[in-house]
Image (cartoon, grey):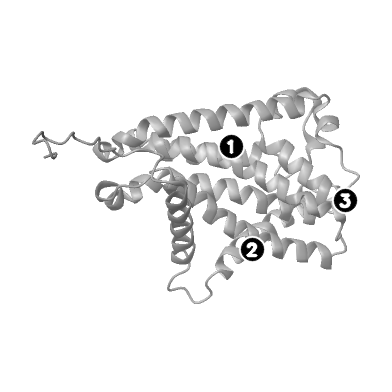
Amino acid sequence: MTAAGQPAALQPVRGPSALGGGARRFFTLTWLLSVTEFKLNYFGTIFGYLWSLVLPLVRFAVLYAVFTRIIRFDTPNYAQLLLLNLTLYSLFNEATTRAVRSVVGNENIVRKTQFPRIVIPLSVVITALLNLGLNLIAVLVFLTVTGVGPNVTWLALPLIVVGLAVFTTGVSLLVSALFVRFRDVAQMWGLMVLVLFYASAVLYPVEFIPPGMRFLLFVNPLIPLLEEARRLVVDPSAPSVVDAAGSVFGIIAPAIVVIVVCAIGLWTFVRAAPRVAEEL
């Protein structure tokens, strides 16, 4: 009641949403969830973080043996290129795969707590970035020991990581929102990640792609990112993205794809966030 005896006006109460709650709370929650998930990944294990390093190295050793002893790629510094590509692709693979079930996996806090829902998939991406950062240190040490670098161009590698993280975030927002309603997304995305692994020039230099197919494959943002990382870190004489694609299309097309994917991912998640608890 007011002083005049009139009933006080009701204040609107915000419902669940993707954003909101203030910038400080938003970033604090995102970082807290990221660090917590990073620690839980290795909680109770004997070797802890080393598992994150051992598994990619085993995969690298197997693939390197296949592509140097059986298929025989005659590419300068192929071992270093393969290890770098596998490490960078692991960010996209790990983050998007875990993001699919991230919102559903946090059902308890989604139902009972009022917070910006978008911090859930974002925290998954940041956790993957923490893993990537530690793994890249090991990769750069390997490159240095094997005589590749260090070079001043390595300082530009964070720009590649930023571009990769932006694209990964857009995809993560999209798949995490869609999985709440359509559980087939998990199986579909598992297949898509496998297809992208072989179609993104992770295992082979971009020169091995027939010129007639490059126009189509360079729409995939992962290819120019990996190719530019190769030129900056492993082989300065490698063709630039424009040269490899045969035109400036190699930069424009993937940039448009990243913008569209991020816009659709954010739009989808923002629309789905208020109804997430009802769908679970």
Q: Earlier in the sequence, mark 3 or mark 2?
A: 3
Indicate the amino acid at tag 3: Pro
Q: Secondary structure at mark 3?
A: loop
- The residue to which callout 3 is attached is 76
Vertically, is 101 above or below 28? above
x, y percent for residue 157: 75, 50
Indicate the amino acid at tag 1: Val
Indicate the amino acid at tag 2: Leu
Distance of label 1 from label 3 (alpha carbons): 26 Å
Q: Earlier in the sequence, mark 1 or mark 3?
A: 3
Q: Residue at x 47, y 66 (%)?
A: 39
Q: Is residue 219 left or right of residue 16?
A: right
- Crowding at dot 1, Cα within 10 Å, few <14 / some 14-19 / many 20+, comes out as few
Q: Quadrant of the C terminus?
A: top left
- The residue to which callout 1 is attached is 195
- The residue to which callout 2 is attached is 134
x, y percent for residue 87: 66, 54
Vertically, is 138 above or below 93? below
